Image (tube, rainbow, N blue to C red):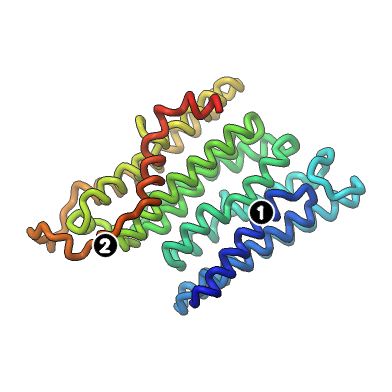
Amino acid sequence: MTPTAMSMFFTSLAIGTILTLSSFHWLVAWIGLEINTMAIIPMMTKTPHPRAIEAATKYFLTQASASALMLFSCLINALQTGEWGMNTSPSMMTNPLSLALTMKLGLAPLHFWLPEVLQGISLPTGLILSTWQKIPPMILLFQISAHISLTLMVILSLTSILIGGWGGIGQTQIRKIMAFSSIGHLGWIILILKFNPQLSIFSFALYIIMTTAMFLSLITLSSTKMSQISTSWTKNPALTTTAMLILLSLAGLPPLTGFLPKLLITLELVKQNMVIFATLTMLASLLALFFYLRLTYIITLTLSPNTHGSLTLWRANTKPYVMYSIISTMALTLLPLAPTILLM
């Protein structure tokens, strides 16, 4: 794909996202989401492989279904209230609209497209799909958070946390593991969307930072399977150590950044007298902790039979990665800065 085409698609992604984030009109927000969808599909198919074509087709069909449901909900809402504004009073179409947005995010039980699509595309496109493409639906959910059903959000979040941990246990493909990791993290985020939307957005920002750092590690190591990442120690020990720490941060272990959203969300649930749900979410997240620790064990404590004794980084790309260093530092060390960040 030529640089001109790539720049055009990236510009379309930015325009679609800005259009959705800055709109107070449901039809304009819907148009922004459609621009986003149309812009990323050519990026998925830039490698002419049957798996990439299949992933792009699944993504298009799923997003088209969610967009149709979203547009139908907005039309009925406009018919009832007489206006297209997002700040209208709650109506009977709030739940279908919430389901359409959660389908775009890939939350369980509407998650079946996400692991297959992420597995069929390249790592850079997977990074965009796991981070950038989730921003517009999440912001729209944030804008209607006062009107969404608490029961619906709790059911979707608990299901997502459970399936996000359960689905990733038996996987050997790292992109599928990252897909189920995304499902589990988004379950934590929408659990407190009704109670504290600001905390949800803060947790979502930390999720984007940690996921970006992990994908950049995989892109640098050129690893898509566990068998490939198990040989990464001899290529670049420092980068492999950083990847291991980012995985532990995604798992939510202290004193890393990933512990901060889980701690704050649990405290918010306890404050809202939802101790049972806080206990259930923590128990369900133990499933995800298992496959994070399993992947960490494979990275650091197993050595492949073909390791060599040379100290020369003959297979490593030694050019500096400034952005990766910044993102990795943020993904690991933001926990001590939590009081300052929350005061801001």
Q: Nearer the viewer, residue 29 or 179?
A: 29
Instruction: Return the disc, 1 or 2, that comes first in the chain's sequence.
Output: 1
Query: x and y percent of residue 305 in the render?
Result: 12, 61
Q: Nearer the viewer, residue 9 or 97?
A: 9
Mark 2 burial class by Cα count in 10 Å: few <14, some 14-19, many 20+: few
Q: Which residue is mark 2?
A: 317
Relative side of 290 to 191, left or right:
left
Position above or below: 309 against 342: below
Q: Nearer the viewer, residue 336 or 75?
A: 336
Task: Residue at 51%, 48% (x, y): give it.
Answer: 183
In the rendered image, is residue 266 in sight? yes
Under tag 2, what secondary structure? loop
Relative side of 29 to 202, left or right:
right
Query: x and y percent of residue 127 in the render?
Result: 47, 57
Q: Quadrant of the C terminus?
A: top right
User: Label 1, label 2: how many angstroms apart (C-alpha)?
Assistant: 35 Å
Q: Nearer the viewer, residue 275 or 33?
A: 33
In the rendered image, is residue 227 in sight? no
Of the residues shown, which amino acid type is indicated by label 2?
Asn
Residue extending furthest toward the right = 82
Q: Which residue is mark 1?
A: 18
